[in-house]
Amino acid sequence: MPRTRNPAAARLAQLELAAQEERQKQRDYRPLADQLYRSLTEPQRKVWDDGKRFKLLCSGRRFGKTYLCIARLIAWAIENPGSLSWYVTQTYISAKQIAWRQLKSMLPPEMMLKTNETELSVELINGSRIQLKGSDRADALRGVSLSALVLDEAAYVKQDAWEMVLRPALSDQCGPAWFITTPAGSSNWFHDLWEQAQDFDDWATFSYTTIEGGNVPADEIEAARLTLDERTFRQEYLASFETLSGRVYPDFGDDNISQDIADTGGPILWGTDFNVSVLAGVLGSRVGDTLHIWDEVSVRQTNTDEVCAMLKDRFRNRRLIAFPDPTGSARKTSSAGRTDHEIIRQYGFGCVSPKAPWAVKDKINATNCMIRNANGQIRLFVHPRCKNTIKALRNVTYKQGADDYVIDKTGGIEHWSDGLGYLIMSEFNPLHLNAGKGTGIRLY
């Protein structure tokens, strides 16, 4: 005869299982968080210990970035029952390859209530969840409220994913966010974020080389130095923000940047580039044979009329001389059919521009001559507040595979260096007439 199931015994077993699950939920896993903290290197602990809400860590290879990410995510999950924390990197596949196995290996089995291999998620017995995501499908990340966030290899995460989706997802809980990465050049959005972080109290930045990370022997790093070019080695092992090859203004550097320059009170020199999306330019003064750029213009979705009105109101009773794009003598941006140059003059500004556009080669060479000439003399100085101008001079490159002096304009940062070039060509014209022959001589 078949055995009869004892309902009382089954009920007792259910109660015992429920009691066991409740005991597990009540177990204090804070010692695990302490253990993870003690396993960190000293530089990793400095990042962990800082009390700022937003942290940016830029480090060399093999620093232990991913381990630090996952350790902090687990600690957040333990400290905040019922929370949702995300690990985000460039793609879903990258998230699975880089962090999924490591996350599961760092969590005790009894702490995991369930895992989902497809969603790359772990639910803990205290109700917290940790999920791994890729930024390649940013719209799929919408609609959640996040308790905490880590962006691993943040320089390669899509900028829109952070700005349009992830940042708002943290707002209702005021959750923390960590950005951890190796550098990806100084024209990358992470570098912009790094510079902006200096201006906010709730942001902190940390930079460590591979050797400072303590996970790679010094002789291994020296071996890598022998097989990599200098720029790649500095970026990957020294955590240096390196510019791309083929820079248009290769000698522009820290020697050209100065906190000391300021408006001299004389004529204001305005070099400007007309553009549909942004009207960009530089404001400076001539000091002897040098040019001091102490501010810049960056106004989006505007027109020449609006910018001229803004400058006239800002610099009342001052003489302002514009050095615009030569094509503005024909380009009409007002409903009255006035050209950009006519608008500039109608506001009472001087307007200096040749009848024909400058040759790109001449404009580039003239600017480079001001940056640093063959004798090492520097005649161009830019104030640090001119971030767009500095970014352009550091990062504008030639277009790969194109003819000489064809600039890569995909980044949209060349407008400020163009405006500077128009000013330099007109005010510091390196083309001089040879008095004896009446021919042009280039002095660069």
Image: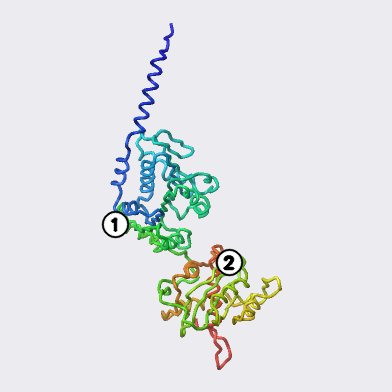
Q: Amino acid at mark 2?
A: Val
Looking at this view, is 74 or 115 the one in front?
Answer: 74
Query: Observer-nearest residue: 242 or 274?
Result: 274
Q: Quadrant of residue 375?
A: bottom left
**Above or below, 335 relative to 237:** below
The residue at which mark 1 appears reads as: 218
Question: Dividing the picture into quarters, in which one does residue 185 lie?
Answer: bottom left
Q: For this view, does 291 lie left or right of residue 42? A: right
Using a 10 Å C-alpha cutoff, classify the residue at mark 2 as few (fewer than 14 neighbours), some (14 to 19) or many (20 or more): some
In the image, residue 261 lies at what x, y percent? 43, 77
Q: Is residue 222 left or right of residue 280?
A: left
Asked if one can make out residue 352 in the rendered structure from this viewpoint, the answer is no
Q: In the displayed structure, would residue 281 be above or below residue 69?
A: below
Image quadrant assignment for residue 60: bottom left
Q: Which residue position holds label 2?
A: 278
The residue lying at 40 percent from left, 40 percent from top is: 101
Looking at the rendered structure, the kind of residue marked 1 is Ala
Badge 1 marks a residue whose secondary structure is helix
